[in-house]
Structures are given as structure tokens and as C-alpha cells.
Image (cartoon, helix red, strand yellow):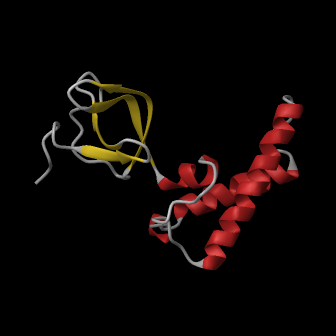
Amino acid sequence: MQPKANELRFMTKNDGCVHVHPSSVNYTVRHYDSPYLVYHEKVKTSRIFIRDCSMVSVYPLVLFGGDLYQPTIVCVSQVAELVKELRWELDQLLEDKIRNPSMDLCTCPRGSRIIRMIQMKQKTNPESFQ
């Protein structure tokens, strides 16, 4: 049984329990394929609400979400090292692109290699990160 819209809640690092605001297009969503949401705004009225939110899968969080100190993200050490290297390579690639906006990420060797790795990872089992 899916929870009612006003019963569905999420946890934030600083505020604890938050709810999707009734004005959000996601207010009526009862199930998300990922337990993570990104949001633009929090408001506090009768309780803390998030607005302008979108569900996000674990892969973008792992690749673009900053330092990973969350103890709930657990994976095999070899996978963790590969992800760490991929993040570093991706950061370097993005810095190169910022310095050289005309660079074609799909045709440069580093870019095409990283894109292939990300595409390959998308096809694998997302349960490798829990």
C-alpha cells in the first residue's frame, strides 16, 4: 500500500524529516524509483516542505554529488576505487571543457572513454551501491 501524499516524507542532513509541498508537481507521486530527491527550495509553515524537487538516481549523486561521506552508501572496495577514479577523470574533463568550450567531448580521447564508462555503468545493476 502506497502512503498518502501528506504521509510521504524524506530526510535531509540538517532538517531531518521534510515533506513535498502541496504546490509541487511531485506532491501526488506515491513512489520514487530512487530514495533521493534534489530540491531548490525549503519552506517552513506547519512543517518543513520542499518545492521544486526532482527524483535523482544514485549514479548522478555518486558522480557529481561532492564528497561521499554518507555511511549508507556501501559498495565493494574495488568498485569504490573505480568510482573515485571515474569521478576524478570526469572532474578533469569538465575543467578541460570549461577552459576550452569548443572541445567536443565525444571525439576527444578522454571524453569518449569517460562517456563509454558512464554508459557501461548505466547498463549494470544499480544495486552495486546501497
User: At x 35% / y 48%, what residue is drawn?
Assistant: 11
Residue 57 location (% of width, % of height): 46, 50
In this view, 44 is above or below 7: above
Residue 55 x, y percent position in the rendering: 40, 42
Left or right: 107 as drawn, with respect to 17: right
- Residue 104 in the image: state x and y as whole percent: 82, 37
Q: Quadrant of residue 100?
A: top right
Residue 105 visible? The answer is no
Position of 113 relative to 53 (above/below): below
Identify which residue is drawn at 66% across, 64% down: 83
Residue placed farthest to the right in the image?
100
The residue depicted at 44 percent of the width and 47 percent of the height is: 13
Quadrant for residue 18, please give it. Answer: top left
Residue placed most toward the observer, 104 or 56 = 56
Residue 117 image position (x, y, % from top left): 69, 60
Q: Nearer the viewer, residue 107 or 78?
A: 78
Is residue 89 placed above or below 43 in the rendered structure? below
> From the viewer's perspective, is 121 left or right of 6?
right
In which quadrant of the rendered image does the C terminus lie? bottom left
Left or right position of 112 against 124? right
Q: Which quarter of the image is occupied by the N terminus?
A: bottom left
Please name whichever residue, 9 or 124, is drawn nearer the observer in this view of the structure: 9
**Looking at the image, how many numbered discs can be counted on the residues?**
0
111 with respect to 56 (left or right): right
Any part of residue 78 in sight:
yes
